[in-house]
Amino acid sequence: MDKRRRSRSQRGVTIIEMLVVVTIIALFAGIVGTRFWNQAGKAKRVAAKVQINNFLGSLGQFKLDTGLYPTTEQGLKPLRERPENMPSWNGPYLPQEVPLDPWGRPYLYRYPGEHGDEPDLISLGADGQPGGEGEAADVVSWKSN
């Protein structure tokens, strides 16, 4: 009999109330999650651009010391290891091993480049293929964005 006399405020949460709360939480997570993943893709593109700019700075220092840029065949390796027959090398020019791009692939390096006097550095973006749009677009050294 005492159980029946409990006031409505003392009763437990109904299944309908629980479903409403769970639905609101799911909607909120969906909205926030979508925005978060969109920002994560943008952050990877920014990180690739920052790494490319760091490479360009290191390559500039390499050229000041040696008088030339590494060849396409040498790639970025001379920024960490002394090439043969290069006594003026004063590296390493990077504090750590040459990193992969934010999508886990090596950067493409070309010298002589096709876009000016400096080497061309390229990250192929999320899809790993030349070209593309949005997150799949290439991040390149000769463009500012």
Image (cartoon, rainbow, N blue to C red):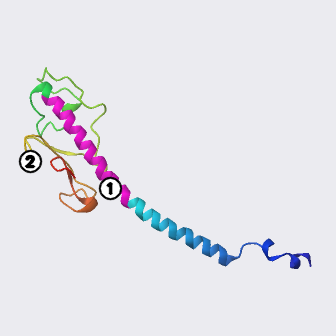
Residue 63 seen in the figure:
yes
Which image quarter is the N terminus in? bottom right
Examine the rendered structure and indicate whether residue 79 appears above or below residue 25. Answer: above
Residue type indicated by callout 2:
His
Q: What residue is disc 2 on?
A: 115
Residue type indicated by callout 1:
Lys
Residue 62 pos. (x, y %):
16, 29
Most common SS among magenta residues: helix
Q: How many marks?
A: 2
Residue 76 seen in the figure:
no
Q: Which mark is residue 79?
A: none
Instruction: Using residue 102 as the reference point, say whether residue 69 is left or right of it.
Output: left
Q: Nearer the viewer, residue 13 or 9?
A: 9
Examine the rendered structure and indicate whether residue 11 appears above or below residue 129. Answer: below
Q: What range is drawn magenta here?
A: 38-63
x 14%, y 25%: residue: 65
Q: Secondary structure at mark 1?
A: helix
Q: What residue is disc 1 on?
A: 42
Q: Secondary structure at mark 2?
A: loop
x 26%, y 62%: residue: 134
Q: Is residue 67 magenta?
A: no
Q: Is residue 53 magenta?
A: yes
Residue 124 pos. (x, y %):
22, 53
Q: For residue 14, which quarter of the picture?
A: bottom right
Q: For residue 61, which quarter of the picture?
A: top left
Examine the rendered structure and indicate whether residue 76 appears above or below residue 32. Answer: above
x 80%, y 77%: residue: 8
Residue 73 pos. (x, y %):
12, 39
* Neighbour tally class for label 1: few under 14, some 14-19, many 20 plus, Cα within 10 Å: few
